[in-house]
């Protein structure tokens, strides 16, 4: 039985106090901040990581499953990537002219990403989705965008959210319309309402819910029948489902796609990859230009990641680890009788918590996360198996989950689950 660890969080908590005084919103990505964890129980600052393990600033060790919120595909301090970055560092981080690594990386992208006739490199997922939408609008000469879930912080996408609208022009909302995954009827309805005005549909090829039937192909056909482009946002799925992303896994090639997060195992690198004729048509019309787009350290990391993925072994192993975790999680949940599911595809999963009546509440997530982190397993937004999660890590995690499930069951059956919280329950945040 994994023991409840005696931990101090003193340094974490002190840093957070100062951060709130000096950093706007306290941190750079809302979903890394303490509101998405259990204040008082979860660590706030990580000092370092190795393979699938992280150590907080107070010296406590955890097995990590959020993996930097997606980027860490191979593991922390993965030697082949780190060596490539260090070798590049010794030659320079970026020069006054273009570096050959841009061409080498482009060659690999065009070879492995189905939608990559031509590519451009940026730093963030938001940068890539911004570029994709700009390209689609320039190509079609249309304004309206139909979008799925989260696509980043830039204006066109943030404007369609319901929170944090400060500083955004209200009229931007008129051009961005949200639909739920698998809701082809809604997409059709928008095409009718904004006939001849929709530039593109942007969506993740998949999140946790599987595509119904041939939803992805039908979506592509619907876009083309209406003169719009299909963009797959592969910022999370890219390199995780396969080297060519979820588009390769599902066999549906979009007109444009965006990659980010896992591209360089933690270094900031994103890609917009489009059909060659589209990219060539817009080339002289659009403005996408940024100093660090070709930073050599990230490109060196990106090239090293591609080389690791080329044989297919890394993705095969990641799927196998995920499957092992998912199968055993489901078996435990059934045996212990808790309404928690580890949903999704083995390379990208998330936990869904309800009570015995099927009702959701962030309190339920919080109880399970609290009991896991106390025993050395750090949970967050997703469960991302990485290449260096070992069988020992997974078995240890399953033992922790078994204990956490038992507390969860007792808490829910008590009728007063809130009394089981030792810290502040998490809040869901956007971004
Ligand atoms: C599907 C998707 N697209 C785009 C983004 C934005 O990426 P970034 O945070 O690197 O700007 C995210 C971030 O979580 C994402 O999940």
Image (cartoon, helix red, strand yellow):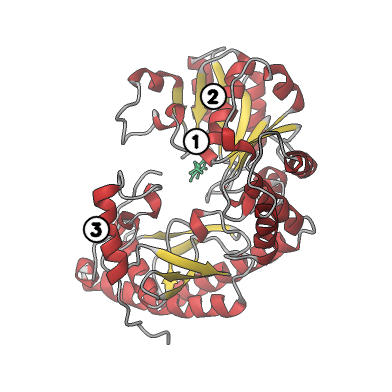
The mark closer to the camera, 1 or 3, is 3
* Secondary structure under the numbered disc 3 in the rendered image: helix
Q: In terms of depth relative to the viewer, which is nearer, 304 or 139? A: 304
| Classed neighbour count for the residue bearing mark 1: other residues with Cα under 10 Å, few (<14), some (14–19), many (≥20) | some
Is the CB of the residue bearing disc 1 within 8 angstroms of ligand 1? no
Is the CB of the residue bearing disc 2 within 8 angstroms of ligand 1? no
- The picture places residue 33, in percent across and down from the top left corner, at 35, 54
Q: Badge 2 is on which residue?
A: 188
Quadrant where the image shows the N terminus: bottom left
- The picture places residue 156, in percent across and down from the top left corner, at 45, 26
Q: Quick check: can you spot residue 220?
A: yes
Quarter location, residue 135: top right
* In the rendered image, the vertical position of residue 16 relative to residue 63, given as above or below: above
Mark 1–mark 3 CB contact (< 8 Å):
no
- The picture places residue 48, in percent across and down from the top left corner, at 48, 67
Q: Badge 3 is on which residue?
A: 17
Q: In terms of depth relative to the viewer, which is nearer, 383 or 26? A: 26
Q: Using the numbered discs, state the Cα–Cα distance from disc 1 to disc 2 in whole angstroms.
A: 14 Å
- The picture places residue 66, in percent across and down from the top left corner, at 48, 60
Quarter location, residue 419: bottom left
Q: In terms of depth relative to the viewer, which is nearer, 256 or 43? A: 43
Taking the image as shown, residue 198 lies to the left or right of residue 351, namely right
Picture mark count = 3
Q: Badge 1 is on which residue?
A: 148
């Amino acid at each position: 039985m994994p023991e409840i660890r005696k931990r101090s969080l003193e340094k974490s908590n002190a840093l957070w106090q100062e951060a709130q005084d000096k950093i706007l919103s306290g941190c750079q990505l809302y979903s890394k901040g303490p509101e998405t964890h259990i204040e008082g129980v979860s660590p706030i600052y990580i000092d370092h990581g190795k393979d699938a393990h992280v150590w907080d600033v107070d010296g406590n060790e955890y097995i990590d499953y959020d993996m930097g919120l997606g980027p860490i595909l191979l593991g922390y301090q993965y030697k082949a990537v780190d060596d490539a970055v260090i070798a590049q560092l010794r030659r320079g981080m970026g020069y006054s002219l273009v570096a050959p690594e841009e061409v080498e990386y482009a060659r690999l992208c065009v070879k492995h990403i189905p939608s990559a006739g031509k590519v451009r490199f940026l730093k963030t997922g938001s940068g890539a989705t911004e570029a994709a939408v700009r390209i689609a609008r320039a190509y079609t000469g249309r304004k309206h965008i139909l979008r799925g879930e989260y696509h980043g912080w830039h204006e066109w996408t943030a404007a369609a959210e319901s929170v944090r609208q400060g500083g955004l022009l209200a009229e931007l909302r008129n051009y961005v319309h949200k639909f739920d995954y698998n809701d082809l009827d809604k997409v059709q309805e928008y095409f009718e309402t904004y006939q001849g005005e929709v530039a593109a549909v942007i969506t993740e090829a998949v999140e946790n819910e599987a595509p119904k039937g041939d939803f992805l192909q039908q979506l592509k056909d619907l876009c083309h029948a209406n003169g719009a482009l299909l963009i797959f946002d592969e910022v999370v799925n890219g390199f995780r489902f396969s080297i060519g992303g979820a588009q390769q896994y599902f066999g549906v090639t979009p007109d444009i796609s965006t990659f980010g997060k896992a591209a360089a195992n933690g270094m900031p690198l994103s890609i917009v990859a489009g059909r060659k004729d589209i990219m060539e048509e817009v080339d002289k019309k659009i403005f996408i230009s940024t100093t660090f787009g070709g930073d050599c350290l990230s490109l060196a990391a990106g090239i090293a990641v591609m080389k690791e993925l080329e044989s297919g072994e890394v993705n095969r192993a990641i799927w196998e680890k995920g499957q092992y975790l998912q199968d055993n999680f489901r078996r435990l949940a059934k045996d212990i009788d808790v309404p928690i599911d580890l949903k999704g595809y083995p390379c990208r999963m998330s936990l869904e918590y309800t009570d015995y009546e099927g009702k959701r509440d962030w309190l339920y997530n919080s109880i399970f996360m609290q009991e896991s982190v106390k025993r050395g397993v750090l949970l967050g937004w997703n469960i991302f198996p990485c290449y260096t999660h070992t069988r020992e890590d997974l078995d240890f995690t399953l033992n922790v989950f078994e204990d956490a499930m038992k507390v969860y069951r007792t808490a829910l059956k008590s009728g007063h689950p809130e009394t089981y919280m030792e810290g502040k329950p998490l809040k869901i945040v956007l971004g």
